[in-house]
Amino acid sequence: SIQYSYERNVATYDGSMSQKHIREMMMENEFESAIEREEFVIWYQPKYDVKTERIEGAEALVRWKKSDGTMISPGEFIPLFERNGLIVRLDEYVFRKVCQIQRERMERGERVLPVSVNLSRATLHHEGIVERYAQIVYDSQVPFEAVPIELTETAALYSIQIQGLTEKMVDVGFLLHMDDFGSGYSSMTSLNVLPFRVLKLDKALIDFIGNSRGDQVIQHTIALAHGLGMKVLAEGVEVKEQVEFLRTMECDEIQGFYYARPLPLEVFSQLLDEEQKA
Ligand code: C2E
Ligand code: MG
Ligand code: MG
Ligand code: MG
């Protein structure tokens, strides 16, 4: 019977793997037409100033809205596109779109707040990436401040291997934010070597709030970042107690469901307009 259940397990495992594989093949095959049909849509999650509780900026988060109306979350396709290299094109597509949207807001005389864009490790590794991205900024005539770039700690650390890449980005004018800090193997090397403006504390750290050891970890991480001249943003903030604790700790910005979820452009723009009137 052991043999039997063993075989059954193997069979089940193979079955679910092939389901996943089929879905991945679908996403890979449909990537090209999805770009053409503009099925990749960008949602905006507001970032709030802890003191004023006003919107200070947003993060651009991509979703795949298929023609049948179903949505695929980035958690599903980003890891795949990171493995097969398509992420380089998707990242550039998102960056170009965000620059365009910022440009249009400027032209209409609307309030322009920084909208940060995520860059994968694979994208960083791509030949001539700094020049390409800088060209997009120049072509769309937006200031670098309007489109900060988020790199995860691991992507950033990895880029140390690519001689001076992040330094080159900063020299050109890009503002860098370190994403997901504290989600994996955090290393002081990343804080020491790399020129980041903002440290984004990962939800995994924020979830420690309320446990006395966790509170101390956050307190000292914020102090460390401030000491190094960085601003601190807390990600994944969902409850009031977290907001209050972060305010006491002098965290600068908050991004999380407590204030707002990622929103389609129209809803985000509306929110900005309403806030400006208030
Ligand atoms: P991220 O860059 O760390 O983005 C934050 C993620 O946390 C978003 O998930 C956001 O919806 C979620 N989040 C924000 N506040 C809360 C909260 O209070 N509670 C919870 N449970 N979640 C919260 P999303 O949009 O599903 O994106 C997941 C990841 O996909 C992103 O993590 C980022 O790594 C990646 N991603 C998204 N768009 C892009 C892109 O254009 N390029 C690249 N390379 N990666 C992207
Ligand atoms: Mg991010
Ligand atoms: Mg993050
Ligand atoms: Mg994340």
Image: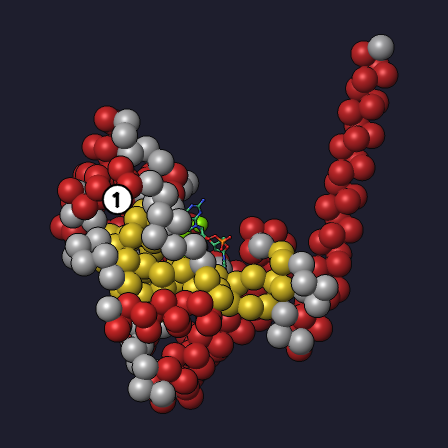
| Image spot of residue 79 (x, y percent) | 58, 52
Number of labels in the image equals: 1
Residue under numbered circle 1: 243
User: Could you classify mark 1 by the number of other residues whose Cα lies within 10 Å: few (under 14), some (14-19), or many (20 or more)?
Assistant: many
**Can residue 190 be seen by looking at this rendering?**
no
Q: Is residue 135 left or right of residue 4?
A: left
Q: Residue at x 24, y 68 (%)?
A: 278
Q: Is residue 130 left or right of residue 194?
A: right
Q: Residue at x 44, y 67 (%)?
A: 267
* Rendered image quadrant of residue 58: bottom left
Q: In the displayed structure, would residue 250 be above or below residue 39?
A: above
Q: How is the image coloured?
A: secondary structure
* Rendered image quadrant of residue 30: bottom right
Between 20 and 255, the one lying in front of the other is: 255
| Image spot of residue 155 (x, y percent) | 43, 55
Answer yes or no: disc 1 within 8 Å of ligand 1.
no
Judging from the image, what secondary structure is the residue with disc 1 in?
Answer: helix
**Can residue 33 be seen by looking at this rendering?**
yes
* Rendered image quadrant of residue 59: bottom left
Between 261 and 59, the one lying in front of the other is: 261
Q: In the displayed structure, would residue 105 be above or below residue 213?
A: below
| Image spot of residue 63 (x, y percent) | 56, 61
Q: Residue furthest front?
A: 278
Q: Residue at x 35, y 48 (%)?
A: 258
Q: Residue at x 43, y 79 (%)?
A: 101
In which quadrant of the rendered image does the N terminus lie?
Answer: top right
Between 157 and 230, the one lying in front of the other is: 230
Q: Is residue 203 left or right of residue 73?
A: left
| Image spot of residue 99 (x, y percent) | 42, 78
Amino acid type for the residue under numbered disc 1: Val
